[in-house]
């Protein structure tokens, strides 16, 4: 009677397990990216320290940081332009980061599904060969 190795079974189940874990992590990444895309100004990524919740908050943060370092105090028109530029920059960064995360997580999910399905089918065939006399 020939004794068959269990190494292929262990390998196949290990690949399936890794695929499932990677799938779950990628789904979490997609959820985070979608939530960041829904409101880029309030996303969890802190690119800069100044608050851009409102112009007044931004103005206070800028004036507070400038009062410690320099004597230059920008006027309201300059501050408004700085605020708009900061808001646009932060929005574009969050959108770019979220789209990148969606793309990477989506590709990983596709790879995980393909790996899981191919290895699971292979494991079923291998298991049938081992169990049949």
Image (cartoon, rainbow, N blue to C red):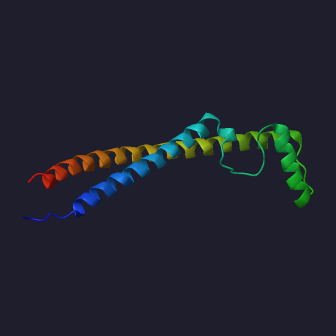
Q: Is residue 70 visible?
A: no
The foreground one among 18 and 56 is 18
Q: What residue lies at 43% left-to-right and 51% top-to-bottom?
A: 21
* Quarter of the figure that contains the C terminus: bottom left
**Image x and y of residue 77, in percent:** 85, 39
The picture quadrant where one finds residue 10 is bottom left
Image quarter of the N terminus? bottom left
Q: Position of residue 7 (x, y in %)?
A: 24, 64
Closest to the observer, 10 or 98: 10
Residue drawn at the location 52% of the way across and 42% of the way down: 99
* Relative depth, front residue between 89 and 118: 118
**Total count of labels:** 0
Res 76 visible: yes
Q: Position of residue 11 (x, y in %)?
A: 28, 60
* Residue ranking furthest to the top: 38
| Quarter of the rendering containing residue 86 | top right
Residue 12 vertical position relative to residue 1 in the rendered view, above or below: above
Residue 88 vs 14, above or below: the answer is: above
x, y percent for residue 29: 52, 46
The residue drawn where x is 52% and y is 45% is 28
């Amino acid at each position: 009677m020939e004794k068959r190795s269990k190494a292929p079974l262990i390998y196949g189940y290990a690949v399936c397990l890794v695929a499932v874990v990677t799938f779950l992590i990628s789904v979490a990444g997609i959820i985070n990216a979608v939530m960041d895309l829904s409101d880029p100004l309030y996303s969890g990524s802190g690119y800069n320290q100044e608050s851009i919740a409102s112009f007044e908050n931004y103005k206070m943060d800028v004036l507070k940081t400038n009062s410690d370092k320099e004597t230059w105090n920008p006027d309201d028109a300059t501050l408004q332009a700085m605020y708009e530029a900061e808001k646009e920059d932060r929005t574009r960064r969050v959108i770019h980061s979220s789209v990148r995360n969606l793309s990477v997580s989506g590709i990983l999910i596709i790879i995980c599904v393909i790996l899981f399905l191919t290895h699971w089918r292979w494991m079923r065939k291998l298991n049938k060969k081992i169990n049949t006399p």
